[in-house]
Image (cartoon, coloured by chain):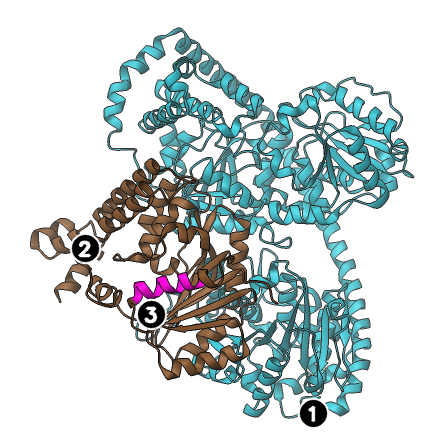
Chain colours: A cyan, B brown
Amino acid sequence: MNVLFVMRSTIYVRNFESTLRTLASRGHRVHVLAERHLPESNDLIARLCAEHDGITWSVPPPVPFSSWSWLGRDLRRAVDFLRYLGSEYADAPKLRARAEKGAPPFVLEWLKHPRLASPRGRRWLTRVLRLADRAMPTNPDIDACVAGADPDLLLVTPLVEPGSPQAEYLRSARARGVRTGLCVYSWDNLTNKGLIHDPLDVVTVWNDAMRQEAITLHGVPAGRVVVTGAAAYDHWFTWKPSLDREAFCRLVGLRGDRPYLLYLCSSKFIAPAEVAFVRKWVTELRRLSPVLRDCGVLVRPHPQNTDQWDGVALELDQVVVWPRGGANPMSAASRAEYFDSIHHAAAVTGINTSAQIESAIVGRAVYTILAPEFAATQEGTLHFQHLRQTLLVAADFAEHAAHLEAAVTGGGDAERCRRFVESFVRPHGREVPATPALVDALERLGAQGRARPDRGPWWGPVVRLALRPIVRRRADSDRGRQERLAWQEKLRERRQAEVAHQRASRGDARRVAAEARDERKRADAARREAASRARAALEARACENYRRIRDWAVRLRPAAGDGDGAGCPRLEALAPLWAATPEMIATLRRQAAPIGLSAPDEYLSRDTEPMQRLKRDVALLRKQAGSGLFVYEPPDLGGFGFAEQGQLFNRDTVRFFSAMVALEDGAVIQDFRAGAGRRVVWEIGGGWGGFAYQFRTLCPDVTYVISGPPLLLLVSATYLTTLFPDARCRFEEADGGRMEAGWDAADFVFVPESAVGALTLPRLDLTVDLGVLAELGEARAAFYVRRAYDLGSRFLYTLGGDDDARLAERIEPGFWAHPIPPRRDRKRLDEDGTPADPPDRHVVGWRRIVA
Amino acid sequence: MSAPPRIVFGMPAYGRPEALPQVLESLLTQTRGDFALVIVDDQPSPEVRAIVDRYAAADPRIVYEANPSRLGMVGNWRKAFDRGRARFPDAEFFAWVSDHDSWHPRWLEVLVDALDRRPEAVMAYPQMQRVFPDERRAVTRLFGTAGVGSPFARLRLATSEMTAGNCIYGLFRARALAQAGVFRPVLMPDRQVLLALCLLGEFVHVPQVLWYREVAGVFSFDRQRRMFFAGRAPLYLYLPANVQHCAVLFWDFAVRGRGRPAAGRLTGARFAAWQLGCSIWREVTRHDAAWRVWLGRTAIGRRWLGGVSGQAQESAAGMAR
């Protein structure tokens, strides 16, 4: 897919770094069109281009002044301004004043008429202005630019600037039938900027609240809004502190033996004069609370609002302004410092800033005070209401001091942060990153192919004919001449800047490339070394787990009778694992390959037909069901498979993925991911632990019970306890266990099959059979179905190569069978020309009353 | 004494004893238990009675009532609602359930949660699976009006995109449903009541497959006239359905003012007119519109429609066969 991503300037790359990387790593070509901005943002996009062949960047072409474009911008500015006169902005005087400042004179003039100024008049006026805007012609220079790039997909951000200059790119794209999308830049964009004026094929937003804003405030059809989560913040979930607390405090100049409060400054619009407030804030808190008197204070200036801190000395003990010149967290170093400053803080305070969201992600409690000097930019902005979900808001300093004192002495409200993050930043689940969801949405759009070219409404030429005299008159007016001169001046400055940049970059290019190469090498070496250390630690842990679990499993062998798998060739192949060497445990997954679907050797070549089919199956499932349920095979303990973005998948992975998709299609797994409390799952057999690994990764709040022969449990328990080192495990003895008490304190429960008959569970939400029932005799299979029923299993999921009727027949003594329609590949046909069925069928059974 | 139910299921039953056990079990095993099931039987038989008695003996939430004479589908659906309201006047939600489809055990839990989260919504419904005799197909198309504040915009969306046969098996706020007039003696009464509900609130579509619908019978107005009424169908049923709907909406909202306080009489009148306009527009523009089908039967029409609507031509060809 060929993507043209139009950004206002390189500063916007920051929030789409992971998106650009993922698009490139999935083989798409992305060209970013963005004006130069801050040096660090220019460096970021340059770095991305250097690291990924699929990413390129250029500045937009110089577009000469056009009277039509100017009129179009003015019409859209007028509509944007009218929006702020609505009742929802009644309490937002500052936003309203800002919009008025940018409104074209004609609309201000029109609004002097009482009829036009009334709500109905404004609605009518908006409609007329919108119609006129729709009739504006596309700009030939921008048409040429889009035609030159010939994208399959044109994305824009932020689009919602006053007058929406980027709308012209959308119109040029639509005129060519190119699909268009808006990747909403940030959480406040839909409420305190301009409107979305043009139809888009997709609008990606962070969460349901923003989805509602897109629908209600911007009129985007609900079906075109995709909730992805905040891709910009994905990386914060994986950061670890780079310095310990002592070292960090030393670095910034605070005492390491005392807690400190972090004050995060806001942007120029929100808090133009924040220095005096910070001084008052510190003084008041220290006056009101003896606890806070001993705390240090770290003030981080907003990166785009640092001027006010130049030369300011707060002259307060243990109060540090750092970093003085502000630091946009774009590079690894600045991000590490930023993360450390939040991570080590006892509590975080601010007026109204995105950094408060980042603090919630890090898990630090976030506080604010409703300051009269910022009333217009706290309660007076709509997006502040989003923050209220995580912020503890104080009405005055006394209350604020009490909040902070509680945070310093008793820790923050981590649960509040978690809830906020799960609803606002990662609405698909805390463990589900947003970037793949965003890229999936874009890929789905790209896969739709070209749309019918939209060259504007049929009546456009008529309206343009009528408007032509007005356009001419405007262009010849004083304001028109000034506008034209300003535009030309801007173009001239840009040309000069480009020439200067090219001269400088020619000299610097080699040095920059060499530095980047060295940096990459150093980072790679450090990564390799860290990975090697982690691998050694993991293998040592695996050996230790194995020895402990083997002692338990050996005790079960006499009771199991054929616990070595006598009579079952696949299990017999695992018999050497009773006396495994450390090397065998280090490659446990490979040793267990005989009980999986494939062997490591099968993945040496990517070009065989079965392997190509496997890749197609994955692509199809991900396209149809999204990647939210796809869990890669972990590379630890000898994981194998095809590598994709450094992650592995194989036939087992894909089979488990199809099972997860079936559980989603059967509306079962949603309950396990909804955070509605702990659930219990029983897997019959358990295999080598692969499905349990996937299930637990996707649904962490689960007690996962695995039953099987001792040898199989030895494998799965070693595998799972090693990959989930913090999991709490329970190993039942041969006479079965009673789990009424403390069941929710166990993450994994391993039950020998000889104990299944005696096992009792406090509840059972789902029984999983990944084809084991089909391999057992009928009587044994019926026994397991009966046990699932007797244990109270609400659902029984079964999978296998049999037809639906056979699978259903097996579980119907206790469960109503509901076959899940297979996800078919329409391109893969049977001999009779109908789409071929996938190898496995899935059935979800609902518990019967009368069994 | 147990707390009054928050939800009432109304089952207008009509002679499907072979499917009834599975339906009853799918309802009685819901993960939310605070409901009552009112069965109104329009074709009572000993088999149905025996099945219901078997389950009612173990579950006091079931209430059964046999009609002394056939009411027809409209009357029976209406009675299911009325009896539910009469017995459980405090119940907040109501849902019609058939005697042959299946409800996922989480159906109630998920939909109640959806309505609790969205006070502006008057109805929530899930995605569904169509159960054919030899296969099943999930229907993943989404239609909802959540977030659409204007009732006129909701009505426009509903007119063009809603599949009433699926939505009518959603979970309703009982008060809103009563206000909208429940089932009226018109063609496509499900569509009419849903359009009326557009005035009162939003529809939420939950993207989970929680309803399994048996596919049987082909839609036709003749079948509706036959099935919906116990005796002969009234003559006005031969008017276009959208005219009937417009008249009922006008009577309810403009004349009787039943939309208040959400909408006054004038808004109600505009709403009825808007419904007529939208439905006419839909009839004119839909790919399988009657005029296209008719035109597709002629040689000139086929040539003209060539690039316009292959599907309409297919429909026309199908009808001609």
Q: Mark 3 points at which residue?
A: B215
- For mark 3, give the secondary structure: loop
Name the one closer to the observer, A703 or B170.
Answer: B170
On the image, the x and y values in percent for residue A490 come to 49, 17
Q: Distance from label 3 to label 1 (Cα)?
A: 49 Å
Q: Distance from label 2 to label 1 (Cα)?
A: 77 Å
Q: Residues within 10 Å of mark 1 (few under 14, many from 20)?
A: some
Q: Nearer the viewer, mark 2 or mark 1?
A: 2
Q: Residues within 10 Å of mark 3 (few under 14, many from 20)?
A: some
Q: Mark 1 points at which residue?
A: A562
- For mark 2, give the secondary structure: helix
- Majority secondary structure in the magenta region: helix
The reply to whether the magenta stretch includes residue A539 is no
The reply, left or right, for residue A377 in relation to residue A295 is left
Q: In this view, does A368 lie above or below A837?
A: above
| Type of amino acid under label 3 | Val
On the image, the x and y values in percent for residue B318 come to 17, 64
Name the one closer to the observer, A191 or A594.
Answer: A191
| Type of amino acid under label 2 | Tyr
Q: Name the residue under label 2.
A: B236
Give the magenta part as a residue range.
B73-84
| Type of amino acid under label 1 | Asp
Q: Is residue A697 visible?
A: yes
- For mark 1, give the secondary structure: loop
On the image, the x and y values in percent for residue A292 come to 87, 33
The reply, left or right, for residue A547 in relation to residue A452 is right
Q: Is residue A449 visible?
A: no
The mark that comes first in sequence, 2 or 3, is 3
Q: Quadrant of residue B78?
A: bottom left
Q: Which chain's residue wears label 2?
A: B
Residue at 57% of width from left, 26% of height from top? A91
